[in-house]
Amino acid sequence: MVLDNQRDNVDPILNRFAKFFLHFNPNVLSLISLIFAFLAGVFFYFSSPALELKNFYICFAALFVFLNGFFDAIDGKVAKITGKISVKGDFIDHAFDRFSDVLILGGLALSPWCRDQYFIGLIAVAGMLLTSYMGTQSQAVGAKRNYSGLLGRADRLVLLILAPVLQHILLYFYSLDLLFGISLLTWILVYFAVVGVITAVQRFFSTLMWFKEK
């Protein structure tokens, strides 16, 4: 599942939404995206299985993750349409993406949903950062931006939107613990940790193959 490879199919839809934000500076939209990531991380961090059916915190977190991804996708489109594409803007966009990823995953990893299994969250964050680094470093050495592998940022965002809602629904029917006494949200982090590291390795060797072909 690599939704990053579907960018060409999604671009026409994003361009339509971008037209509603043409009066915004693209960097402001990037900042708005970061703010939503911060809110998502906060709601993940303060959520808990005991109170979730009353306060809906992880559902709010999922909403803010969606808004983070939406504005992250829109800022580049606005920059392109208005002719404001710049190296500085590209740097801000990618930097804010990494801050956003750490805020969102960090908030979830440190939340009561993961209990004392914080090492899983640490590996998930490490895998996420390595994956992103390999993608941008490929571009830095002269190859194109590397979106290959099993798990891209778009995939993570979709899972972080759907999984919290599903976890909330599951609380109506099951206890917190699923397979091996681990919550669904923790299993999502396990998936990010394992597949994220695999994706980073895939991108590493993909770039090495580019050097060989060059």
Image (cartoon, rainbow, N blue to C red):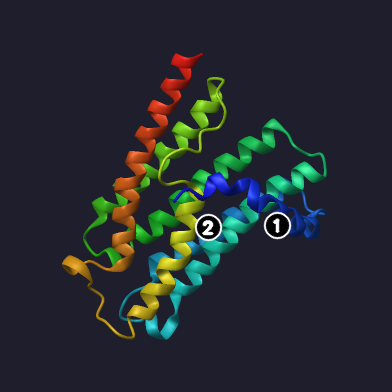
The answer to whether 115 appears left or right of 6 in the picture is left
The residue carrying mark 2 is 37
The answer to whether 212 appears left or right of 78 in the picture is left
Q: Position of residue 1 (x, y in %)?
A: 44, 51
Q: Position of residue 182 (x, y in %)?
A: 22, 66
Which one is in front, 207 or 176? 207
Question: Residue 41, can we see it?
Answer: no
Q: Which disc is residue 2 wearing?
A: none
Question: Residue 172, can we see it?
Answer: yes
Q: Secondary structure at mark 1?
A: helix
Q: Secondary structure at mark 2?
A: helix
Q: Residue at x 34, y 79 (%)?
A: 170
Q: Residue at x 50, y 38 (%)?
A: 147
Q: Residue at x 45, y 56 (%)?
A: 104
The answer to whether 183 appears left or right of 130 in the picture is left
Which quadrant holds residue 88? top right
Disc 1 to disc 2, how far (Cα)?
Answer: 22 Å
What amino acid is labelled 1 in the image? Ile
Q: Which disc is residue 13 wearing?
A: 1
Which of discs 1 and 2 lies nearer the camera? The answer is 1
